[in-house]
Amino acid sequence: MNMEQYQDTFIQHNFADRIGGSNYGKDTAIYKFEKIKRAKAAAKKEFPHIELIDMGVGEPDEMADAGIVRKLAEEAAKPENRGYADNGISEFKEAAVRYLEEVFNVEGLDAETEVLHSIGSKPALAMLPSCFINPGDVTIMTVPGYPILGTHTKYLGGEVYTVELKKENAFLPDLNAIPEEIARRAKLLYLNYPNNPTGASATVEFFEEVVAWARKYNVVVVHDAPYAALTYDGRKPLSFLSVPGAKDVGVELHSLSKSYNMTGWRIGFIAGNPLIVKAFGDVKDNNDSGQFIAVQKAAAYGLQHPEITEKIAAKYSRRHDMLVAVLNELGFTAEKPKGSFFLYVEAPKGIKGGRRFESGEEFSQYLIREKLISTVPWDDAGHFVRFSVTFISNGEKDEKRVISEIRDRLSDVEFEF
């Protein structure tokens, strides 16, 4: 039987309401990333001899450092590493504490009680609501943003309140705009800096404001920091936990996916308030049996060598410089981000004497189908597209060629903003 035939069986009526109940699988809406996928396939079919420049993929374009790969191979060959890792090994937790101190100036963390490994940030975000959310409780999220914490809040019968990230506020949420009634019902506040998709960075002053706000309303802060070590032009990486009082109100999630080119390795960690870390560990213990010990040991090696990330950041910084220059030359208002590999720019209103773009999605589809340049649109708070400088290239010379090709493809039209 195919899927459609099973829709007439009892299985269709047994699905939980949280994923659609008896209507699960019948939704015909085409979502953003599926539209992008289809547009890319159509463009490749129509123009088979033209390179599709993919600047939409939000993951690193290179292998993990050779030293990390070598360490994995060594540790995977040891019989003592073959078993369950459960809630992690001390070696990784201690490396995480030293990493936070060396790179982010976070002092005084206890490796035993205030750090725990995770199988990447996404599972950690999925599990944290189980520690706090009862039906009717509120999680405050930002839009645009990464929705996982909110999705699982809803699964548990909670509510999500969204705060827009606006250009005029440097893409930081206006905490004072959150209604008093929402703030008092909220259990969780989700933040992510440097931010996906805007590329915006937080400041010490903003994090101080967050700590004060969280104390006032008794809200737990979850700071998702997978891009935190990818900073540019002399800017020092900033951790929420480096701000006085942050550990009293929340935790920070780190991942090696973006900063160490270890996306598929699935390794990260949670750090901060020991009571939150303990609760996460209890929930985690009922969800997984830990990441492979050899992966944890290879990750510990990576954390002991932050210069690996510095080299990766230098590449992204170089690419950002070139892309920003070209887009501004074409009429966009592009500003190099202080962190992350994302460049977030306002979509044009149209082409002079030609078609109009009513949304970021319309512009993104135009770029893919007619210019074979893939980006990701965001229409949650204004009309924007997100470029990612993780495109595939063969060295610096080829990077220049790719950016030059973008200029050439977009130079035959004049955009109106």
Image (cartoon, rainbow, N blue to C red):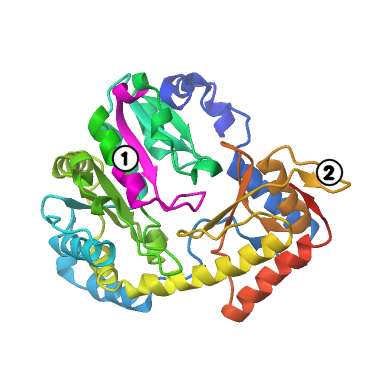
Q: Which residue is mark 1?
A: 210
Where in the figure is residue 314, as x and y percent of width and height? Answer: 46, 73
In the depicted view, which residue is nearer to us: 264 or 315?
315
Asked if residue 356 shows in the view, the reply is yes
The amino acid at mark 2 is Arg
Where in the figure is residue 334, as x and y percent of width and height? Answer: 62, 56
Distance between the alpha carbons at the discs numbered 1 and 2: 43 Å
Residues tagged 1 and 2 counted as in contact (Cβ below 8 A): no
The amino acid at mark 1 is Val
User: Element under label 2?
Assistant: loop
Horizontally, residue 411 falls left or right of residue 73, namely right
Residue at 60%, 59% (x, y): give it: 55
Q: Which corner quadrant of the image does residue 134 belong to?
A: top left
Residue count near mark 2 (Cα–Cα under 10 Å), binned few <14, some 14–19, many ≥20: few
Horizontally, residue 304 falls left or right of residue 178, namely left
Q: Which residue is mark 2?
A: 355
Q: In the image, is residue 395 part of the stretch drawn in magenta?
A: no
Residue at 37%, 58% (x, y): give it: 228
Q: Which corner quadrant of the image does residue 280 belong to?
A: top left
In the depicted view, which residue is nearer to us: 346 or 27?
346
Horizontally, residue 122 falls left or right of residue 11, namely left
Q: Nearer the viewer, mark 1 or mark 2?
A: 1
Query: Which region of the structure is painted magenta?
Result: 182-209
Where in the figure is residue 253, as x and y percent of width and height? Answer: 30, 50
Q: Quadrant of the N terminus?
A: top right
In the depicted view, which residue is nearer to us: 252 or 164?
164
Q: In the image, is residue 204 part of the stretch drawn in magenta?
A: yes
Q: Earlier in the sequence, mark 1 or mark 2?
A: 1
Asked if residue 52 shows in the view, the reply is no
